[in-house]
Image: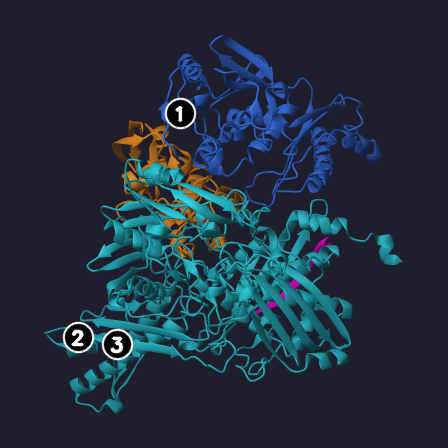
Chain colours: A cyan, B blue, C orange
Amino acid sequence: MNGDRVGASPHRVGGRERVTGQQQYVADIRLDDVLHVKLVTLDCARARIVSIDTTAAEQVPGVRLVMTAAGLPQPVPRFGPQFSDRPVLAVGETKYHGEPVAAVAAETKDAAEEGARLVRVDHDELPAVFTIAAALDPAAPLVQDPEIRPTDPRAGTNVLREHRFGWGDVDAAASSADVIVENTYQFPMVTHFAIEPHGFMVAPDGGGIACWSSIQHPYLLQKMLARILGLPLAKVRVFAPDPGGGFGGKQNPKLEPLLAFIALRTGRPVRLILTLDETFQSVRRTSAEIRVRTGFHADGTLAFQDIASDFLIGAYVDIADRVVSKGSYLAAGPYRVPAARIVARAILSHTTPATAFRGFGNPQVNWARESNIDEGARVLGIDHLEIRLRNLARHGEAFVPGDTPADGDWVQTVRKAAEMIGWRTPLAPGRGRGLAVGLKSGPTTGLSYSTVRLLADGSVLVYSGTSDMGQGARTIFAQIAAEELGVPLDRISVVSGDTSVVPYDQQTSASRSSVLMGTAVLFACRDIQEQVRAMAARLHGLDEANIVVERGMVRLPDRETPIVDVLRSGLGRLGGELIGNGTMRKEEDPGHPLGGTAAFFEFNCTASEVEVDEGTGEVTLVRHVTVGDVGRALNPLQVVGQDEGAAIMGLGHTLMEQIILDETGRIRNLGAIDYRIPTSKDLPLELRSASVENADGPGPYGVKGVSEGALLCVAPAVAAAVTEATGVVIRDLPLTPERVWRALAERPGPAEVSR
Amino acid sequence: MHAFAYARPATLAEALTLLEKHGPDARLLAGGTDLIVGLRQGAIRPAILIDLKRVAELRHVIDEVDGRIAISATAVMAEIENDDRVGRHFPALVEAAHVVGSVQIRNRATLAGNICNGSPAADTAPPLLVYGAVVVVAGLKGTRRVPIDDFIVGSHQVALERGELVTAIELPLPDRRLGAAYLRLTRRHGTDLASITLCCAVDEAGTTRLAYGSVGPRALLFIDESGVLADPGAPAEAKEAILERVFAEARPSPRSIRASPEYRRAMLRVLGARALRSAIERLAGG
Amino acid sequence: MVDTLPIAVTVNGRRRTLEVAVHHTLLDVLRDQLGLTGTKECCVVGECGACTVLVDGSAVNSCLVLAVEADGAEVTTVEGLATDGRLSPLQNAFLEKGAAQCGFCIPGQLMAAQALLAQNPHPTLTDVHEGLAGNLCRCAGYQQITEAVMAAAEAAVR
């Protein structure tokens, strides 16, 4: 039974369903009498909608409704997690390539598609902005209607917000620095490419609605639908089947409100499963241009960090402004930095709304900062490992003055990665090694409830509103229950994905669930343990103070018995169950620049060894190592899955991924043919991951979040390795063969170097 | 995908009659790996698909007859990869067939379809050019044999008249010992459309045949009979000068998102030199 | 007008006679007409492999095969791997190695692996990477998937 408990790697909960094809994702759920919905979009980015002619579409046999903005409540409702700026359907103009202008509901998919093809949208393309420079031009067209933020002095520009963080006196520090290195780095526009395209269904449901969505935040969706539809929360039931990959892209509501209005108009269940191409048009990561000015003392210690980031967000804010602020807050890194100045701007553009994406703004700043530290190390002639060891904050050190101190032994993590890559071993000719560290704040607030029911036969139901999108949350919660209640995993079920049945959870994001929901589950189990203690006291006529209940066992003064045995005796012939409740709140801190302190930090060290084909510019990863400071691996196999998966995903934006726009803002590489992600043949020849476990996290048994760390600093590690192999420094991602080749072609010849 | 009609002729005569009747409203379906993508994207909207997979005359997949290997219009890449005779005589074609998409694609995609689709990036075009393949074209009026170099016309254009279809691609067995290699350039190590396709063969008499694609409307073939390219001892500058002329015909698209013209031109030189070296080594290695 | 044709296919050992729209793919028919939703839909252009099934033993992208083309064929989907509720060695290996994360690509990975092992019972790592190169996994559990395929191959040897 130890194989079921915390620290073991039992089979994934839901694993059997996943290998037999029985797992039901949203598109696999069939509703009777359903109407199929197809979106109508324009093949351009920003356009004025002159008129919409639905006549031909309405005549297609089987078409039941063509919904346009005119058919929605007026003014058309708007929504969004930060600003209520996204309309249910485009009103008056489209603001990005693929923004829906109408939707056709029909009896069959074929009829809906045919109808959508026949909706005629008379439109005029309008001037638009797709780059940071264009958006910042004083003459640029405004992306967002200034009415959305009437009191904001920046409402007349495309700068949504400017965030400023920092400490110390950077200018004074600059005058004492021995070396100052300043460079600008680019991070591309990339998309999530979850293998499951987004899908939504809505059905009228006894005076309210039921909604099915492949969503990470079902309770946020419930709230948003209730607000838009004017319904009480209790009349909005959200079913959230396990997403087939989320990565942040499925956090926030998108087309559910549209489907709700269609369902209410037609009185029928409606279903919209996006194509992969449409999914690309729905979500992306913020691209960024980041200028880093770093001051060093001659011994390599940092004098200051001066970082100015421009993030290109999309046409609607979604959660992207939070991505910018939270991603930039720790821009100075996990280092002792005497002075730091961080300015980050969220800049609107007529592009796909950027949203959360694994790493949440941090991969961008980690790329820039780590690369610039390497450039300084080269100038100073200091080894890349050494310069990090000299500057890393030690456990307990407040590396951001006045804020949460370093919560792990980060030096240990870095040393482990260096050892695993063989940092000090000789390199073969033509090869290079790089090493970088990544840091990200965990959640700044949290609210998770769990209910655990210990049933009469000693089996267990765990209720948790976390979305299991591959990270294996349900397995972790079951392991916690197994550990605390002493029940084998095959007698535990974890219930999730139904807001009418499962208690509230704020969200599934920021690698929070093991820590926050895990704690709620732990507390619910402890609640049951307390009840068992009372039960045992009653059964044995003992004082409760003489009884200890822990880790599945009831310890009486003279012996110990399993919890479930006490339960059986305690419930007696009538039966029943014990119900435990657990709540985990992480309160806001209004004084904190992010509205709350980090629940934990995700710290990672990545090291990479590459070989570069100097003829073609192709980069081959010979060896790649990723080490995370995880506190405690509750399920080591799942930690490996998260770490290696994040590392390979990071190789995507490092080596090959980028959304390419044409001059009118259309996505040119829409879909799987020309948007390339890593395949089994793109793996490093050797990929290894490891965890540092000091049980120093805030979650159950000392756990910290783990799901994003290994992605944070892949790019700077690989790029540094490319530099070592070739001598060229590349400051733009991805490191495509062509980009590397171009840099090599522009490399000064040996003659120039010797002059 | 829009609705269309579907026919599954059992004989070549039936297929040709259907094709004659429907003309440009018909599309031929062999493997479907390009066709169905085109249908899905709305790039083509034929009224009828004519499925060739059950045509009796096309069933003999790969045959050796009269000094040539005939590869039927229904032969898929996986069959070509695994055929000993093709592997023995035309190893660069096997190398090209092996990189057409994934296993799943190679289990469906046909050689004839790869050529008839007319993509400038078709992997099998350069080796077929190098090996002097002949396309067997059938119509109601009879059969004609078209050298592959004449068959490939331009981007998505091949020399098929109304009512004609390809029944086979024939490869004459080489009468001299050859060393050949196929190389391509992609954006990732995994499956990808190539931004350069290049095949080179040298023979024991000193002739070099080099074909390349994905850098213009169609793949191009060059034959060097000077002996310089094939000569392991010839100075690098002499070879480079010839290759420079060979690659001067490249017309890479400035609109492509896969690679810039500049990069493609440079990579032609790199891959050209590598393929040549490899072909020479293979000839020497027997 | 939508043209339909009758087809007879053996799906997971069971013979089925169906009337299918000729423009519907095998993927459409498996999911929508037969309710076999284990086969997944993602890119629909043959790039991701989520819809991989076996047709007469060969792994194919069912999004690129018209249902009418499968007339007379034997089709195996992920639902056909287990026998009498007992997982196949490959399925067990996927569970054991933690190869399934979000799980959405897994049916396709399993079918590609099944075809690979049928053809090549003792694959090398390179063979497995090549055999599964047409199956994208964004959780990027490639290493666990590869280990699972190798483990299943070894288990079959023992």
Query: Which residue is nearer to you in this view: C63 or A290?
Result: A290
Can see residue A516?
yes
From the top left corner, tell me how far across and down residue A260 is, in percent.
30, 55
Q: Indicate the quadrant where residue B54 lies.
A: top left
In this view, A7 is above or below B285: below
Query: Which residue position holds label 1?
Result: B47
From the top left corner, tell me how far across and down residue C153 is, in percent.
44, 46
Q: Residue furthest front?
A: A50
Front: mark 1 or 3: 1
Query: Which residue is nearer to you in this view: B57 or A479?
Result: B57
Front: mark 1 or 2: 1
Give the structural element (helix, strand or loop) at label 3: strand
Marks 1 & 2 on one chain: no
Part of the protein shown in magenta: A428-440
From the top left corner, tell me how far across and down residue A530 is, in percent.
26, 83
Which numbered disc covers residue A633? none
Query: Which residue position holds label 2?
Result: A568
Can see residue A608?
no
Marks 2 & 3 on one chain: yes
Q: Residues within 10 Å of mark 2 (few under 14, many from 20)?
A: some
- Discs 1, 3 touching: Cβ within 8 Å: no
Query: Which residue is nearer to you in this view: B187 or B1?
Result: B1
The amino acid type of the residue labelled 2 equals Arg
Which numbered disc covers residue A580? 3
